[in-house]
Image: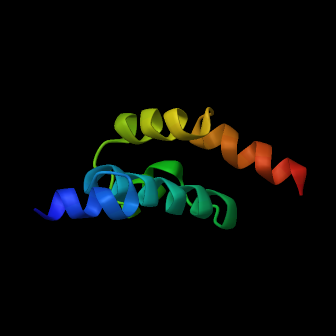
Amino acid sequence: SFKREFKKLYNNSPASYIKTKRLERAAELLLISNERVSNIAFECGFNDLANFTKSFHDKYNTSPTNYRSKVNKED
């Protein structure tokens, strides 16, 4: 099946892979734009801001807002 072959190639499920790519894109947008966090979440395919914030925190160990301000201060 597609899922098995995908998992062999990417060592990840298709859903998890897509979610990771969405979060990476959101992190990128947080740094290069001044768009509201909610708009970035929706633009990256998240339908629920709370779900986006939790997923983002799980991956980056910080909230989207803190990620943006912390990384921008380092520049």
Q: Quadrant of residue 1?
A: bottom left
* Farthest residue, direction left: 1
Number of marks in picture: 0
In the image, residue 60 above or below residue 20: above
Residue 33, compared with residue 57, is above or below; it is below
Q: Residue 10 in the image: x percent, y percent?
A: 39, 60
Picture colour scheme: rainbow
Dividing the picture into quadrants, the one containing residue 69 is: top right
Q: Residue at x 63, y 41 (%)?
A: 65
The quadrant in which the C terminus is found is bottom right
Q: Looking at the picture, how far across and down is residue 67, in whole percent?
A: 68, 43
Q: Is residue 47 left or right of residue 56?
A: left
Residue ID at (53%, 34%): 57
